Amino acid sequence: MNQSKLACGIMSGTSLDGIDVAIATISGAGLNTKIELIVAETFPYPKDILEKVKLAIDNELRVRDVSSLNFELGRLYADCVTKLCKDNKLSPSSLSFIASHGQTVYHQGATQDGSNPNTLQLGSGSVIAGLTQTTVVSDFRVADMIAGGQGAPLVPFVDYILLSNKDKTRIIQNIGGISNITVLPKTQHEKDVYAFDTGPGNMMINYAMEYFFNKPYDAFGETAKKGNLIKALYDEILQHPFLKLQPPKSCGREEFGVSFTKELIKRYHNHTREDILHTLTVATADTMVKAIEQFVLNKHEVDELIISGGGVHNTFMMDQLKKKLHPIHVLSTDDIGLSSDFKEALAFIVLANQTMYQEPSNLPTATGAKKTVVLGNVSYYR
């Protein structure tokens, strides 16, 4: 079990800002897991496929087109892995396994309007396995949902085994399209760990940048810095029903995606673009701050907030968090030796490693599941 293996992780998140592919060595399992990044790269989505993904998310594709997109994404992910391997003089078949999260086009964590909890990630694991000639683990969320969980967040298990510290109570926060946190009390007991989505991460900001400036994101938060707060818009965001729910809870584009953001922009169109970006960014940061205050600081004295994901690069947002959460020490996973840009791709390598050992890798305290379960479907290549 302690033998080191070469593995690959593929992550394409709700922000749709690219396909993260990481190759790492991994050994052990559970609390004995050791992982080390070898090489990683973010591949852009081809424009035509990106448009199809957006249409699928907006429920504007026919079933046959969704099915076709599932295969197209599988081929695309396989091509990304093959290219990264080739550029680094590796063969995909030398990988022990590939972990592919897939592209989420729909996620409903709880019963809603008579519909049972369900989730859909596209990018066929069998297609990736056949094209890379490598075993692939994919479709990680379903098993947790069938066990009564919300299928999210899953990364807290990885946070627990890699980042818990007996001397410090830590919050591990990932700011992707959605923001989620894992609370790691210094007891280091699994039952004391809990996690949940705090609300929007980069999702609303990225859409507004695309809408107003034809840019994928607000580099360093420079546009947001130029604006002023629109109090009514700020209040409307902070009154979103999701923010009042008790953890465990998860959200996605269904709550804070294009439809929600577009409607806000429409209602506040008489304000400057910069003011809208400023307000979206401040409100987004404050959803994180208020979640931490309401659901964490009432239970724990927190030593560190360690952030990963694209939000790390939004200096304006990071400054908001540092100022409003003082005296908690705010830093990034890069500061403790774990890539902030590729943390989630690495995390799914860890989850897939558990799957290959037939070991569970969900945290019921995070997802709300009734029990621990082995996650993922395995597509073998022979």
Image (cartoon, rainbow, N blue to C red):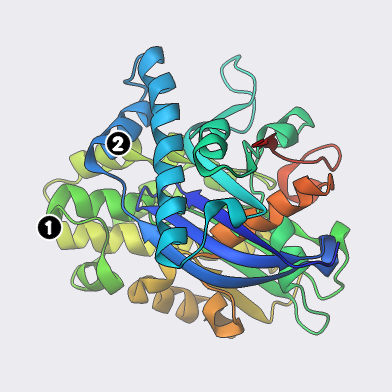
Quarter holding the N terminus?
A: bottom right
| Neighbourhood count class around disc 2 (C-alpha, 10 Å): few under 14, some 14–19, many 20 upward | some
Q: Let me know if residue 167 appears in the view.
A: yes
- Residue 296, horizontal then vertical, whole percent: 69, 64
Q: What residue lies at 31% left-to-right and 55% top-to-bottom? A: 205
Q: Position of residue 43 (x, y in %)?
A: 35, 55
Residue 126 on image: x %, y %: 57, 31
Label 1 neighbourhood size at 10 Å, few (<14), some (14-19), many (20+)?
Answer: few
Question: Which element type, helix, strand or loop, lies under badge 2?
Answer: helix
Where is residue 105 drawn, in percent x and y?
45, 32
Q: Assess whether mark 2 and mark 1 are in contact (beta carbons under 8 angstroms).
A: no
Residue assigned mark 1: 272
Foreground residue, 350 or 119? 350
Which amino acid does the dot numbered 2 rest on?
Ile
- The answer to which of marks 1 and 2 sits earlier in the sequence is 2
Q: Nearer the viewer, residue 66 or 330?
A: 66
The amino acid marked with disc number 1 is Thr
Horizontal side of 241 relative to 98 (left or right) equals left
Assign a secondary structure to mark 1. Answer: loop
Identify residue for label 2.
49
Q: CA distance from mark 1 to mark 2?
A: 32 Å
**For residue 274, side relative to residue 79 (left or right):** left
Q: Nearer the viewer, mark 1 or mark 2?
A: 2
Quadrant of residue 181 within the rendered picture: bottom right
The C terminus, quarter of image:
top right
Position of residue 159 relative to residue 60, above or below, is: below
Going 31% across and 46% down the picture, which residue do you hit?
Answer: 45
Q: In this rendering, would 21 be left or right of 380? A: left
- Residue drawn at 86 percent across, 39 percent down: 371
